[in-house]
Every structure is written in C-alpha cells, then in structure tokens.
Amino acid sequence: MSRILLAMLLGLGMTLLTSASRVQAADPAIGHMVFFQLKENTKENRAKLVAACEKYLKDHEGVIYFSAGARAEEFDREVNAKDWDVALHLVFKDKKSHDKYQDHPLHIKFIEENKATWKSVKVYDSHLPAPSGGK
C-alpha cells in the first residue's frame, strides 16, 4: 500500500512541475526600456533624472532588474542611437507586475515631477525568454 501511495505522490509531483513549467512559459518576463531626451541636456540634469529613477522606480514589486544611466557618448558608431540622454531599464517577472507598476503612485509621482524636463520619451516593452546559462 505504501508503494501505491508513493507512486501516486510522485505522479502528482510530476503533474505539478509540468503545470508550473506551462505557467512560466505562458508568463514571460517583461523588458521595459525607457529612453528620455531632455529639453536641457546637461550633466546636472542627467544626474537629477537618474537620481529620480532610483528614488521612485527602483524597488517595485516584481522588478527583477533595475538600472538607470546616462548615454555613453563614447559609443559613436553609425548604428548608435543618439537621440536620448538617460535610459531606464527594468525587467519585470511578468506582465502583471509591469501593469501594477504602471499605476503605482510612485511611478505616477516620478512622471509628474520630471515630465517638464523631457523633450521626448520612448518606451520599448518586450517579452524576454528565461535566462540561459552563459559562460
């Protein structure tokens, strides 16, 4: 009888693992990349916007990666986009986390406090595959 119970438990465990894999596959991580062009592109204004990103956008639920920084001007190839000054990179564990972030009071406060300094904003959202083992 204990062997039958053990076999049933193993079967249930395999079913749960398979279901969890399907949920992960159906809910990819979301890359949310935002590129800000400032009305006045000065070192001080870039630093202020990066600091505001860190203050308001860094520690939201579901964020698995955060960074904000100024454009690296030393990269000057033809293919390098130069129509932005500060980049915000967020990776959310899933779309639900992304959507919750969009309506969060801190995200809204960030926009309200900083939008007057922006000439333009470009947002690139993408589905991200699970990370693979790199070298």
Image: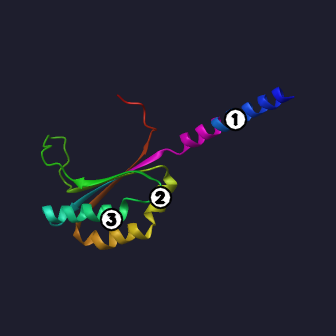
* Amino acid on which disc 2 is placed: Glu
Element under label 3?
Answer: helix
Quarter that holds the C terminus: top left
Magenta-span inclusion, residue 80: no
Residue at point 28%, 70% (across, down): 115
Magenta-span inclusion, residue 27: yes
Q: Quadrant of residue 84?
A: bottom left
Q: Which mark is residue 55?
A: 3
Q: Which residues are magenta?
A: 18-32
Relative to 46, residue 25 above or below? above
| Viewer-closest of 66 and 117 | 66
Relative to 3, residue 59 above or below? below
Name the outermost residue toward the right.
Answer: 1
Pointer 1 or 3: first along the chain:
1
Relative to 65, residue 15 above or below? above
* Amino acid on which disc 1 is placed: Gly
* Amino acid on which disc 3 is placed: Lys
Q: Which residue was labeled with disc 2?
A: 61
Image position, residue 39 (x, y; %): 18, 66
Image position, residue 130 (x, y; %): 46, 38
Q: Main secondary structure of the magenta part?
A: helix
Pointer 2 or 3: first along the chain:
3
Image position, residue 70 (x, y; %): 20, 54
Total count of labels: 3
Q: Which residue was labeled with disc 1?
A: 13
